[in-house]
Amino acid sequence: MSKDIFTRYSRQIFIEEIGLEGQRKIISSKVLVIGAGGLGSPVIQYLAAAGVGNLGVADFDEVELHNLNRQIIHAENTVGNSKVESAEFFVKNLNQQVRFTGIDKKIEYSNAEGILSQYDIIVDGSDNFTTRYLINDTCVKLGKPLVYGSILGFSGQVAVFNYSGSKNLRDLFPEPPFDENMPDCDSLGVLGALPGIVGSMMAMKVLKIITGLPVESNKLTLIDTLDWRFQTIDF
């Protein structure tokens, strides 16, 4: 490992459980983040900072002004640009050693398997049930670990699915809700720091999977930042 790489990641390498071998695993890893919005932003930020070698980002939206209270990898001067383009600009300015692959398209039944199969770990930062279940089912089919998160208002959820024989999203919620009037961030909002908390937890789980550290399975973490309560339930 070259001197500049060692220096860059030294504070991770100094951790006994990571070390040089763990950092090499991070640099060799391939992670796909689906969604470059509220959750995807902190995930992308911290995975790029940690030195994930191959970082894919899939999103088909453009940056809008109302995104900026929480989607912290985007900026005023990228409003109107594609989120993938904006994410690439952020990553390249943060860490040019990361090989960034932008996927400026919607994850659908026709392309999900082909896209997800190229990566070791999948991170779900999507914002709708159809995509979440498609991602989950594709990960189950391909045998890919899935790091899952969701946010609304002051509340969030985090889990790891389909990892080392663990359960998946359908074991927790067998079917998606079909109520088109289900509340979401567009209707009820989200306080900007919440996705930072949840997304950072998701990034931590990704890095623990990469480096072979213990990861809780078959557990859903519930985050309530209004009353500041954190609860983990088994499923």
Image (tube, helix red, strand yellow):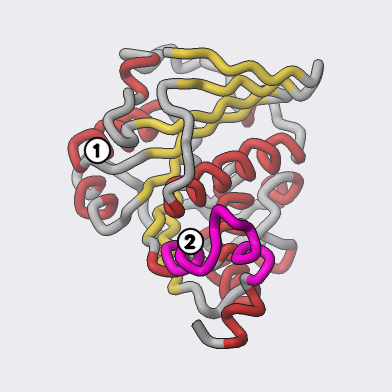
Q: Is residue 193 visible?
A: yes
The range drawn in magenta is: 10-26
Disc 1, SS: helix
> Mark 1 and mark 2 in contact (Cβ < 8 Å)?
no
162 and 86: which is toward the camera: 162
- Residue plotted at (76% across, 24% down): 225
Label 1 crowd bin: few (<14), some (14–19), many (20+), radius 10 Å: some
How many numbered discs?
2
Q: Residues within 10 Å of mark 2 (few under 14, many from 20)?
A: many
Q: Name the quadrant containing residue 81.
A: bottom right
Check the image and report above or below for 118 versus 125: below
Q: Is residue 136 above or below residue 80?
A: above
Nearest the viewer among 54 and 37 is 54
Q: Nearer the viewer, residue 14 or 64?
A: 14
Location of the C terminus by quadrant is: top left
Provide residue 84's location: percent of width, then percent of height: 49, 62
Q: Secondary structure at mark 2?
A: helix
Please give left or right for residue 141 compared with residue 52 in the image: left
Foreground mark, 2 or 1? Answer: 2
* Residue position marked by numbered label 2 in the rendering: 22
Q: Report if residue 36 lies within the magenta region.
A: no
Q: Earlier in the sequence, mark 2 or mark 1?
A: 2
Which amino acid lies under the numbered mark 1 shown in the image of this protein?
A: Thr
User: From the viewer's perspective, is residue 76 above or below residue 33?
Assistant: below
Reading the image, the residue beneath label 1 is 138
Q: How far from the left and from the top, in percent, is residue 186?
A: 63, 30
The answer, for residue 59, to whether it is visible in the render is: no
Residue most extreme to the bottom = 3
Return the x and y of residue 64 as percentages of the image width and height. Answer: 65, 52
Query: In this orientation, which residue lies closer to the viewer: 114 or 202?
Result: 202
